[in-house]
Amino acid sequence: MSLETTVDGATVVVTGASSGIGEVVAKRFAANGANVVICSRTQENVNEVAEQIQESGSNALAIECDVTDREAVDRLFTSTVEEFGTVDTLINNAGTRFMTGFDDISEEEWKTVIDVNLHGTYNCTQAAGKHLKEAGGTVVNFGLSSAANQRGTPSLSHYSAAKAAVINLTTTLAYEWADHNVRVNCIAPGFVATPAVESGFGISAAEIDRVEIKRSIALPEEIAAIAVFLASPDSSHIVGETITVDGVPRIEETPEL
């Protein structure tokens, strides 16, 4: 069974899909025949993405949803089932972060980052649980690269803490839901060439040579391909894993003597 056909007809919910990795993930699933439900906090933004998917001949439903609002999340999955009859895959991509040194993080900022990245993942996964169990579905969470979640990142202590928790949640939930035939995995990207990265660092995806192996930044399409793989039967024996997508490993080189 080829990767291009294994998600054909599946219904996939992608949070935080108005731009960046989430948008590319949604379009990748749609291109492979999935019914895609995309959400973000602003209806106008997801409408535009849904229209692009529909113009390509695929099915897409745009829903405004703040993942920190449980009632809104419940409505998201009710609307998904009403439209497509099921939920086969949940992609927990919604997130937010602020570059702030620990001493300067306000309580409000700390709670906001934890609320969106961790509590939002909890909200969506628990709300989708009944439908995923009925479908024998999959969950794909988003964490941080191994370096960030194990050793942290300067000025991102709150974000790193939340994403490390998501990785641990992935492992625990994968065990709990295995008896329900639901697979839960996680993708931990490193540096990815999104519009936000381009505006902040001046690095465009168009400038990246995909042929070159030794590079420190990924394309969103490379992350999306892994998400599709983890949602498909081709990854049937991958459960509770976090796949790090961070390019060439950072290792200690032998010092010159």
Image: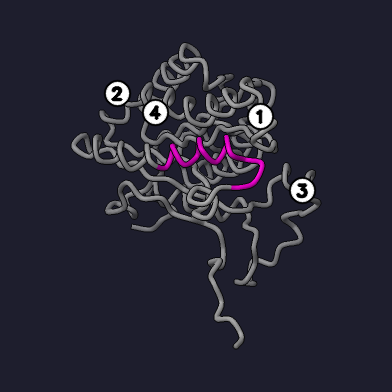
Residue that label 2 marks = 130
Inspect the image, locate mark 4, and give the three-letter code of the amino acid beneath it. Answer: Thr
Question: Would you say residue 165 sits in the magenta stretch?
Answer: yes
Circles 4 and 3: CB distance less than 8 Å? no
Badge 4: residue crowd in 10 Å (few <14, some 14–19, many ≥20): many
Depth order, front residue of 157/60 = 157
Tell me the number on the disc at residue 125.
Answer: 4
Q: CA distance from mark 3 to mark 1?
A: 25 Å
Residue that label 1 marks = 105
Could you tell me which residue is drawn at 65 percent across and 67 percent down?
215
Q: Quadrant of the N terminus?
A: bottom left
Per the image, label 1 sits on a secondary structure element best described as: loop
**Residue 234 at x, y = what percent?**
34, 55
Per the image, label 4 sits on a secondary structure element best described as: helix
Badge 1: residue crowd in 10 Å (few <14, some 14–19, many ≥20): some
Circles 2 and 3: CB distance less than 8 Å? no
Q: Is residue 101 above or below residue 193?
A: above
Q: CA distance from mark 4 to mark 3?
A: 31 Å
Return the residue found at the far top.
Answer: 71
Q: In the rendered structure, which disc, 2 or 3, sits on the residue that comes first in sequence?
A: 2
| Residue range (magenta) | 153-167
Q: CA distance from mark 2 to mark 4?
A: 9 Å
Residue that label 3 marks = 198
* Left or right, 207 with reference to 80: right
Depth order, front residue of 142/133 = 142
